[in-house]
Image: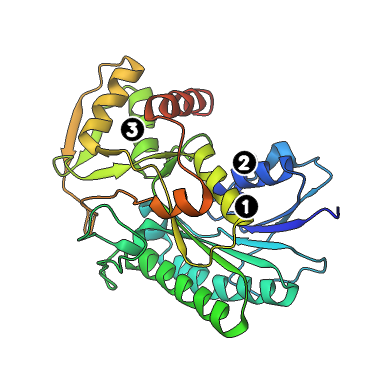
Amino acid sequence: MKRKTALITGGAGFIGSHLCDRLINEGLRVICLDNLITGSVANIESLAKARNFRFIEHNVSKYISIKEKLDFVLHFASPASPEDYLKFPIQTLKVGSLGTHNSLGLAKDKKAVFILASTSEVYGDPLVHPQPESYWGNVNPIGVRGCYDESKRFAEAITMAYHRVHRMDTRIIRIFNTYGPRMRINDGRVIPNFMYQVLKGRPLTVYGRGRQTRSFCYISDLVEGIFGLMKARVNVPVNLGNPNEFSIMELARFVIRLTGTNSKIIFKPLPQDDPRQRQPDIRLARRMLGWSPKVQLKEGLELTVDWFRNHS
């Protein structure tokens, strides 16, 4: 059987690099595109000598030129943490709009399956709980988080337009909070923040009173779900995340117990438009992909803190 080729935009990022690893291990040829605005070559250095791996430094908001045949185009390029997209709001909007348009055009030209990495942020600060794919969301389009939320909502809209007009085989993944090795210590998301603070003996920063909730999915579970969606012709958005819900205060206390430290907890004002609840309804993924997460929070955090100890 001829070896299939996948192009991954944002392939040197946290999720993208793990996806590169998985697809190489599955026998695919992988082309990784990344402009390294938030990604890192360190994430893919283990693949540098792999015969079936190629890295191209490129901004996907500009035209993408690839000569070889492609079977999959996986669009994972985008700043994904509040700290990043508040620092790079215009780049975030461009990669969600121009970058998605360019990636779709490439997939159309190559007759490749197109897979969009969307986000639970399309639901905004949800009024429905847990969040099913049928929920349209509650998003502030002009708020500080709007650059990310709306870029992903636009990306979903143009993906479905290409699916309907050009009859392309497109898939949309709504990714919920994911964590694990290769997250940046200065990522700005809650788990890297807590890891950095607890390993440095600093107080853990909790915003508001810590009553807001998140559902944390370990990276290997997410990648398994993405790979499952590559094999299943499901053209509607699919939630991928761990439905076990924790308050931020519960997470902070859990990290302190897990690491055996004496870190205190300090409180700061809640950021604008910070979602109060986040929990995926994954019934569609269970039914269509036969997928559900396997890694419990304790195991995932132990693996993550070990990685941060060795890389910070």
**Mark 1: secondary structure:** loop
The residue at the point 43 percent across, 62 percent down is 88
The residue at the point 34 percent across, 19 percent down is 258
Label 2 environment density (alpha carbons within 10 Å; few <14, some 14–19, many ≥20): many
The residue at the point 66 percent across, 47 percent down is 20
Closer to us: mark 1 or mark 3? 1
- Which of marks 1 and 2 precedes in the sequence? 1
Label 1 environment density (alpha carbons within 10 Å; few <14, some 14–19, many ≥20): many
Residue at numbered disc 3: 194
Residue 133 image offset from top left, x and y in percent: 37, 62
Residue 259 image offset from top left, x and y in percent: 35, 18
- Asked if labels 3 and 2 touch by Cβ distance under 8 angstroms, the answer is no
- Report the coloring of the rendering: rainbow
Residue at numbered disc 1: 11
**Mark 2: secondary structure:** helix
Label 3 environment density (alpha carbons within 10 Å; few <14, some 14–19, many ≥20): many
The amino acid at mark 2 is Asn
Residue 147 image offset from top left, x and y in percent: 37, 68
| Image-based side of 90 in relation to 166, left or right | left
Can residue 257 be seen here? The reply is yes
Residue 237 image offset from top left, x and y in percent: 45, 63
Residue at numbered disc 2: 43
State how far apart marks 2 and 3 are (Cα).
21 Å
The amino acid at mark 3 is Phe
Residue 243: image quadrant is top left
Q: Front-most of 12 and 163?
A: 163
In this rendering, is residue 26 above or below 71? Answer: above
